[in-house]
Image (cartoon, helix red, strand yellow):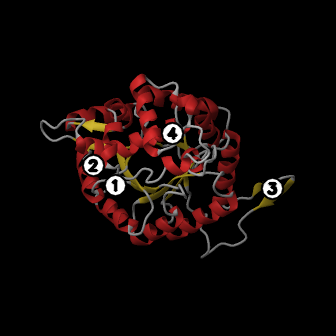
C-alpha cells in the first residue's frame, strides 16, 4: 500500500515535507481548517519549492469556506510551482464549518463546487452563479501565473453515507475519509461510487484513488496497547470524534454507554453544553493537536481500536492488508508526538 502524511499547516511544515520525500512517502497533505490551523495554500507553496517528487495535498477544502474561482486560482498556482503533483480534497466542511459554529454545506453544493474546480483547473470555462446572476468564467491569464496543462487530482471526503461517494462517482474523483478503518464500510463507499459513475462519462485523466487518514502506533514488546504512549499517539483522532459527537446531539445519542459518558465528561470538562451557541469556542481549540495528559482518560480503547491502528508489526500489517483488499490505495497518518521519527517508523513498517 502507498503511504503518505497529513499535518496541520504551520511554519516549518516544509521541513517535514522534505523529510517525507526523503523517506519515500508518496504524498504530503495539510488540513484546511482556518480557525484552528494555518493556511494550506501558503504551507503547500513552501513545500512545493522545497521538494521535487512528493505529491502535495489539501485535505480538505470546501465551498462553505472558499469560492470556486479563488480556490481554482490557488490550486493552479500551486500546480505552477509543482506541476502534476497537486491533490485537492473537497468536502462539505464538516470540521471547518463546525469550528465557526456553523453546519456543513450540502452534497449538491459540494458537487457543483467540485465540477467548477475540475473545469477551471483544466483550463475550461465553467458556470459561476451569484444569486440570480450566472456567468461563464475561465482563467484569463496563463503562462507564469497559473498552470492548467498537468492534471490536478481531486478526491471527495466521505464518511459512511453514500451521498459524497456518489458525488465522487459522478465527478470521476477519488475518495478520502478520516478514521474509517472498517473494510465493509469501504466496500459500501466504493459500490456507491461505482454505481453513480456508470452513466457518467469521465475525463481520461480522472483519478479514482481512495485515501484513509488515521494514526498509527507500533507497540514495543509487551507494551500495553492502551497505555499512555498509545493514547498520546492516537488521542487526537479520538478527541476529534468526541468533539463531533459533543457538537452533534443526534449522533451522540447513537453511541454506546461508555462513549456517551465520555462525551458528557468532555462537555463538562470544557465548560459547555451540546446546545450552547458558543460551544465551538470550547470544543475545538487545539483540534487534531497533541492531547493534554489530563484528557487521556477520554481516549477510550474502543475508539482507539475503531479510529486508529495500534498493534504489533504483524497486527498492523494484517489490518492494513484488509484495507488494501477493500480498495484503499493510500494510507495517510498524522504524527503528533515526534513527526520525523513517527514518519520514519511508518515508512519502515510498510517497506
> Which of 176 and 31 lies nearest the eye of the viewer?
31
Asked if the residue at tag 4 contacts the one at tag 1, i.e. Cβ–Cβ closer than 8 Å, the answer is no
- For marks 2 and 4 on the same chain, the one whose residue lies earlier in the sequence: 4
**Quadrant assignment, res 103:** top right
- State the CA–CA distance, disc 1 to disc 4: 30 Å
Circle 2 sits on which residue? 346
Circle 4 sits on which residue? 244
- State the CA–CA distance, disc 2 to disc 4: 27 Å
- For marks 1 and 2 on the same chain, the one whose residue lies earlier in the sequence: 1
Circle 3 sits on which residue? 130
Image coordinates of residue 60 in percent, x first then y, are 53, 51
Q: In this view of the protein, can residue 194 be seen by the observer? A: no
- Residue under the image location 32 percent in, 36 percent down: 320
- Residue under the image location 70 percent in, 47 percent down: 112
In the image: residue 301, left or right of residue 128: left
Circle 1 sits on which residue? 25
Amino acid at each position: 500500500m502507498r503511504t503518505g502524511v497529513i499535518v496541520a499547516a504551520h511554519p516549518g511544515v516544509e521541513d517535514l515535507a522534505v523529510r517525507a520525500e526523503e523517506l519515500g512517502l508518496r504524498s504530503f497533505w495539510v488540513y484546511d481548517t482556518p480557525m484552528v490551523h494555518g493556511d494550506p495554500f501558503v504551507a503547500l507553496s513552501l513545500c512545493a519549492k522545497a521538494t521535487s517528487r512528493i505529491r502535495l495535498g489539501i485535505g480538505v477544502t470546501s465551498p462553505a469556506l472558499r469560492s470556486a474561482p479563488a480556490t481554482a486560482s490557488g490550486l493552479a498556482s500551486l500546480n505552477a510551482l509543482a506541476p502534476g503533483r497537486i491533490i485537492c480534497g473537497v468536502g462539505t466542511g464538516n470540521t471547518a464549518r463546525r469550528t465557526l459554529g456553523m453546519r456543513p454545506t450540502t452534497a449538491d453544493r459540494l458537487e457543483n463546487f467540485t465540477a467548477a474546480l475540475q473545469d477551471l483547473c483544466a483550463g475550461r470555462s465553467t458556470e459561476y452563479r451569484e444569486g440570480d446572476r450566472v456567468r461563464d468564467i475561465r482563467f484569463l491569464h496563463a503562462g507564469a501565473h497559473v498552470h492548467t496543462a498537468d492534471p490536478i487530482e481531486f478526491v471527495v471526503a466521505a464518511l459512511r453515507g453514500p451521498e459524497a461517494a456518489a458525488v465522487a462517482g459522478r465527478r470521476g474523483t477519488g475518495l478520502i475519509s478520516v478514521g474509517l478503518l472498517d473494510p465493509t464500510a469501504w466496500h459500501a463507499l466504493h459500490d456507491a461510487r461505482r454505481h453513480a459513475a456508470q452513466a457518467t462519462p469521465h475525463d481520461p485523466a480522472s483519478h479514482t484513488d481512495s485515501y484513509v487518514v488515521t494514526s498509527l502506533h507500533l507497540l514495543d514488546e509487551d507494551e500495553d496497547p492502551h497505555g499512555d504512549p498509545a493514547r498520546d499517539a492516537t488521542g487526537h483522532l479520538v478527541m476529534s470524534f468526541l468533539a463531533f459527537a459533543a457538537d452533534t446531539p443526534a449522533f451522540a445519542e447513537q453511541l454506546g454507554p461508555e462513549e456517551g459518558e465520555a462525551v458528557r465528561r468532555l462537555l463538562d470538562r470544557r465548560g459547555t453544553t451540546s446546545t450552547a451557541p458558543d460551544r465551538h469556542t470550547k470544543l475545538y481549540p487545539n483540534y487534531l493537536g497533541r492531547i493534554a495528559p489530563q484528557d487521556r482518560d477520554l481516549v477510550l480503547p474502543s475508539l482507539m481500536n475503531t479510529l486508529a491502528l495500534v498493534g504489533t508489526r504483524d497486527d498492523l500489517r494484517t489490518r492494513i492488508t484488509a484495507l488494501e483488499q477493500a480498495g484503499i490505495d493510500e494510507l495517510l497518518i498524522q504524527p503528533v508526538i515526534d513527526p520525523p521519527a513517527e514518519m520514519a517508523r511508518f515508512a519502515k513498517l510498510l517497506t
